[in-house]
Image: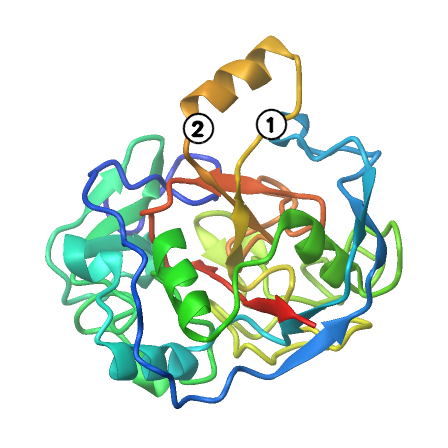
Amino acid sequence: MSKSDPKSPGCCPPLRRTRGTTAEEAIFPSRTAEPPPSVIVPGGMALIGTAHQIIPDDAEGPIRKKRLAPFRIGTTAVTNAQFAAFIAETGYVTEAERFGWSFVFWSQVPAAAAATQGVRDVEWWRRVDGATWRHIHGPGGIPAEDLPDHPVVHVSWNDARAYAMWIGGRLPSEAEWEHAARGGLGDVRFPWGDREPDDVTHFPCNIWQGRFPQTNSCADGYETTAPAHAFAPNGYGLYNLVGNVWEWTSEPFRIRSQRRAAKARQAQMTGYKLAKGGSFLCHKSYCYRYRIAARTGNSPDSTTTHTGFRVVWAA
């Protein structure tokens, strides 16, 4: 498939089908970097899921409650500058760097890149040699050092957990992530409430505008990631809980359903980890996952241009 002719529907993270060693837990030297900016989210009875499922096979519902203790959470996803400090101090090598490649969206592959390989049924995802957190779209693209305040991407679940351990925290649970995303508003669809984003006038987050995957009007101002502090924060002062980049959580991806199709899907996703929030590639017409209750899963060694993470700590 040529760069100008993506055809298949769908947007969520492609699976790294090449298996390799996973990142092992490491003992890191004492860190000198300051933790990322964070806020305390009050504890209480948290809501998880929704009574109005849009994608039932993702197990978005039913809505349920769980009591949480207060916790501290990063105001943004971890940025390129913050991740660079981790690499500089520890010498950690990410999984994309060890594999030698990662997934890049077709329209963002640099013109000078070598021939790329597409993913079956989602051909707009291209395997690009040399794509890593440092070289976001591959060699010849914009380097991460030129985007210090953007979320770090091409980080696997294993990489995200390693950074969180180093900074003295951990990845959030699904309940913590949703509780933080709701911003004190209760049972709402988005961190700002229930008003839908659109392609013309209302741009509360960084998602796709136009016809996916051919045309993105970038009416919200961004073709790929936005700075981690872009757009208005929610009621807890947290930025970009939906859109921009998917965020890894600490949990496995589970489907709570007795439906035959759901059971079959769960069996195919054994060992996958849960991600929340959607990304800059989401649009209501095909991947309506920039909602608080929306969810997806991927293998813990998979990496893409639209997946990052944020950290939580004990309050």
Instruction: Please give the residue where the numbered disc 2 appears in the rendered image.
Output: 269
Q: Nearer the viewer, residue 147 or 220?
A: 147
Q: Which kind of residue does numbered mark 2 sit on?
A: Met
Mark 1 residue crowding within 10 angstroms, few (<14) / some (14–19) / many (20+) = some
Q: Residue furthest top?
A: 260
Residue 163 relative to residue 126: left or right: right
x 19%, y 62%: residue: 97
Looking at the image, is 34 positioned above or below residue 276?
below
x 54%, y 52%: residue: 249
Mark 1, secondary structure of its residue:
loop
Picture quadrant where residue 25 is located: bottom left
Q: Quadrant of the C terminus?
A: bottom right
Tell me, yes or no, whether the two marked residues, 2 and 1, touch with CB atoms within 8 Å: yes
Residue 194 can be seen, yes or no = no
Instruction: Please give the residue where the numbered disc 1 appears in the rendered image.
Output: 255
Looking at the image, is 130 positioned above or below residue 28?
above
Q: Nearer the viewer, residue 17 or 178?
A: 178
x 64%, y 12%: residue: 259
Q: Which kind of residue does numbered mark 1 sit on?
A: Ile
